[in-house]
Every structure is written in C-alpha cells, then in structure tokens.
C-alpha cells in the first residue's frame, strides 16, 4: 500500500469509530426524549387539564377551591360533577372512571 492508501484507511477507520460513538449518543438521546415526552403526555398534561377544569368549575360556582370536592373526590352537586366530566372530555381525558352521584 502506498502512503496515500494508508492515510485514507486510517481516516476511514477513524470515521467508522466516530459513527459508532455518534450512533450510541443519538440512540441514548432519543430514548431520553421519549421518556420525557411520555412523562409530559401521561403525567404533567393530565394534571394540568384537571387543574384547569377545577378552576373552571370554581369560577363558574364562585366557591373556594378546597370546598369543591367532597371526601370521595367528587363534586357534591351533580351539575358541577357533570360540568367537570364534560371539561375533562373536551380537553382529551377520559372521564369514565368518574362516577356521577
């Protein structure tokens, strides 16, 4: 092999090692982004929607925030409970686990 061929072989092997390291970095980064997106979609987003729905019912009724829900976590008033469920569904959360009194 010539000197030129040896240099190109060294450069190719260096690029190959760099690509392997880069691929690992990209995979780890994508995995972390997937975990963060899942955390947002399944935890943070629903909590924010529930909070905004509670505030919407609070503004509608004019009652204090802490007195809106009874001990089981439902609104004492059936109309308020229905409004809360409608708000949840409107914002993309299934309200089937919330029963109406």
Image (tube, rainbow, N blue to C red):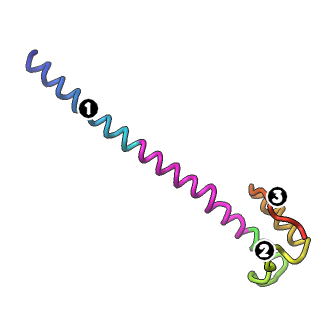
**Which residue shows up at 58% across the image and 53% down it?**
38
Q: Which mark is residue 36?
A: none
SS at mark 2 in the image:
loop
Q: Quarter-wise, where is residue 40 in the image?
A: bottom right
Image position of 23 with respect to 73: above or below: above
Q: Residue 85: within the magenta? A: no
In this rendering, position of residue 48 left or right of residue 29: right
34 or 51: nearer the viewer: 34
Residue 49 covered by magenta stretch: yes
Q: Which mark is residue 73?
A: 2
The local crowd at label 2, few if under 14, some if 14 to 19, many if 20 or more residues have their Cα within 10 Å, is few
How would you rate the neighbour count of disc 3 (Cα within 10 Å): few for under 14, some for 14-19, many for 20 or more?
few
Question: For residue 74, what is the image quadrant?
Answer: bottom right
Q: Nearer the viewer, residue 3 or 72?
A: 72
Asked if residue 16 is positioned above or below residue 67 in the image, the reply reads above
Along the horizontal axis of the image, is 33 left or right of 16?
A: right
| Circle 1 residue | 15
> What is the C-alpha distance between the residues marked 2 and 3?
14 Å
Residue placed under numbered mark 3 in the picture: 96
Q: Is 2 situated left or right of 98 in this image? A: left
- Where is residue 29 drawn, in percent x and y? 43, 47
Main secondary structure type of the part rendered in magenta: helix
In the rendered structure, which segment of residues is drawn in magenta? 27-52
Residue at 87% x, 77% y: name it.
Answer: 76
Q: Which image quadrant: the C terminus? A: bottom right
Query: Which comes sooner in the sequence, label 2 or label 3?
Result: 2
Give the secondary structure at mark 3.
Answer: loop
């Amino acid at each position: 092999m010539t000197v030129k061929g040896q240099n190109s072989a060294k450069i190719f092997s260096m690029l190959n090692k760099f690509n392997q390291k880069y691929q690992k970095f990209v995979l780890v980064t994508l995995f972390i982004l997937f975990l963060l997106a899942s955390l947002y979609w399944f935890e943070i987003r629903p909590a924010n929607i529930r909070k905004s729905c509670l505030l919407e019912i609070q503004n509608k009724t004019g009652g204090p925030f802490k007195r809106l829900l009874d001990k089981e976590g439902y609104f004492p008033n059936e109309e308020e409970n229905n409004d809360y469920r409608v708000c949840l569904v409107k914002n993309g959360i299934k309200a089937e686990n919330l029963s109406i009194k």
